Image (cartoon, rainbow, N blue to C red):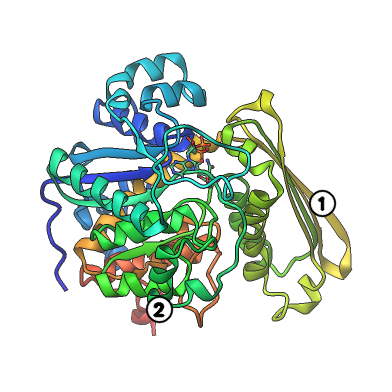
Amino acid sequence: MDTKAPEGKLGVLIPGLGAVSTTFIAGVDAIIKGQTAPIGSLTQMGTIRLGKRTENRNPKIKEFVRLADLTDMVFGAWDIFEDNGYQAAARAQVLTPQDLERAKAALEIVKPMKAVFDQEYVKNLDGPHKKSAANKMLLAEMLMEDIKTFRTTKQTTREVMVWCASTEVYIEASEVHSTLEKFEAGLVNNSPEIAPSMIYAYAALKCGVPFFNGAPNLTVDIPAIMELAKQTGMPIAGKDFKTGQTLIKTILAPGLKSRMLGVRGWFSTNILGNRDGEVLDDPMSFKTKEVSKKGALDYILQPDVYPDLYTDLYHKVRINYYPPRGDEKEGWDNIDIFGWMGYKMQIKIDFLCRDSILAAPIVLDLVLFADLALRHNMRGIQEWLSFYFKSPMVAPELYPEHDIFIQLTKLKNTLRWMMGEELITHLGQEYYDSYE
Ligand SMILES: NC(=O)c1ccc[n+]([C@@H]2O[C@H](COP(=O)([O-])OP(=O)(O)OC[C@H]3O[C@@H](n4cnc5c(N)ncnc54)[C@H](O)[C@@H]3O)[C@@H](O)[C@H]2O)c1
């Protein structure tokens, strides 16, 4: 199947003009101006091996699959606050004053559209810049109007939407999410089980815009939206950007398992003081995050397959809102492991990270890969992008793959498959055949 060329402007539509999205926009601007290298971005810095190791073919990913150029990206956003991108970035306090000033022009032009918001879904936050309508279907239609206006004024040839807004409270899929028909009736009847993020997703897919979810909310992980994605031929993916602690977890756990070392307990705690931390201070929003963060270990370590090593593993995750720390989160892990003859050992990790600095390149890669998937007519769940998510979406009959190394292999093999290149199995037996 051919991939359409990335011609014209790519619209990047973002619900949530906060720490992550403004850091992303400022970084793209700095990269375009040559002020920084695109550090942390696989699409920009990563290479992909093609053919045999003796062939020395290692093109950059962005050249191999023809991704959109950063200079072709134009941004649009929604938020419950009226602050433009520059004001929002200043408030988020991620960037140094110098970096903020350098990106002022690029940030300032992003003026958020009125949000679809419901405080039932984000308890610790409220703002004045919101749409109001008699029902949720009308709100969806207003978002569709926003998208169409953006398309005409910015003259984009295609768009992608990435959810960078606050984490919504924990809900499970229910009847209204089970089919598209019931979901649409629910929109009209103002069903309380339809979250604002689902309304954005519905509007995006209806307008021919892929939707990727950077937060742990249910959002597109429901049969109704999956049905809509199939029907409209749109890619969807989620959930929850894999940044700080879970990134480290999915790097370390596969290594411990590969050497058949046991794990008795894994205690993870965080302090952070940004607005995301404030929202997560509400137990119902935290629950959404907790569920998203806790899945990884079970899937990687497979206690059912390795009962001697991982049965009864005690896994605890804590997030503590601590304003003095701002975006500069600290994540501690204490891991109780055991080895030969059952002898106990411990690993301690203290990751002094920066949340939005880790998340921004993920947004960039997802924007570019969402556009690639769109141009390659790949509809529905994009499991090959699991690499970027804490809680990857998969087909209902599958379990998610969390091991970051398997995820990377899957991603790169998908790119090879798209371009008609041989898949790489790492067998390598052919290099030795001549000695027989
Ligand atoms: N930074 C990370 O490492 C990381 C990792 C994984 C996931 N995330 C998720 O990404 C999201 C953004 O994180 P952040 O640090 O930028 O948070 P933030 O609080 O700085 O920004 C979120 C913005 O979304 C706005 N908002 C809330 N509800 C909205 C709605 N319905 N429509 C439009 N705007 C809305 C808020 O007003 C705020 O400006 C959060 O859900 C967070 O959990 C972040």
The quadrant where residue 399 appears: bottom right
Q: Is residue 49 visible?
A: no
Please tell me whether mark 2 or mark 1 is closer to you in this view.
1
Residue in the image at 41% along x and 21% along y: 87
Residue found at x 59% / y 57%? 250
Q: Quadrant of the N terminus?
A: bottom left
Disc 1 Cβ-to-ligand 1 distance below 8 Å = no
Give residue 316's position: percent from left, percent from top.
Answer: 77, 55
In terms of secondary structure, where does tag 1 sit?
strand
Image-based side of 252 in relation to 399, left or right: right
Left or right: where 256 falls relative to 236: right
Amino acid under label 1?
Answer: Gln
Q: Amino acid at mark 2?
A: Gln
Residue plotted at (31% across, 49% down) = 143
The residue lying toward the viewer, choosing from 51 and 262, is: 262
- For the view shown, which residue lies furthest in the bottom direction? 436
Q: Position of residue 216 (x, y in %)?
A: 55, 55
| CA gap, disc 2 and disc 1 | 38 Å
Instruction: Identify the residue under disc 2.
Output: 429
Q: Residues within 10 Å of mark 2 (few under 14, many from 20)?
A: few
Kindly tell me whether residue 327 is visible in this rendering. yes
Q: Which mark is residue 346?
A: 1
Mark 2 Cβ and ligand 1 under 8 Å apart: no
Q: Position of residue 138 (x, y in %)?
A: 34, 55
Q: Callout 1: 10 Å neighbours few (<14), some, many (20+)?
A: few
334 to 375, vertically: above or below: above
Q: Nearer the viewer, residue 292 or 169?
A: 169
Going from N to C along the chain, the mark reached first, 2 or 1, is 1
Q: How many marks?
A: 2
Q: Position of residue 429 (x, y in %)?
A: 40, 78
Q: Residue at x 38, y 69 (%)?
A: 184
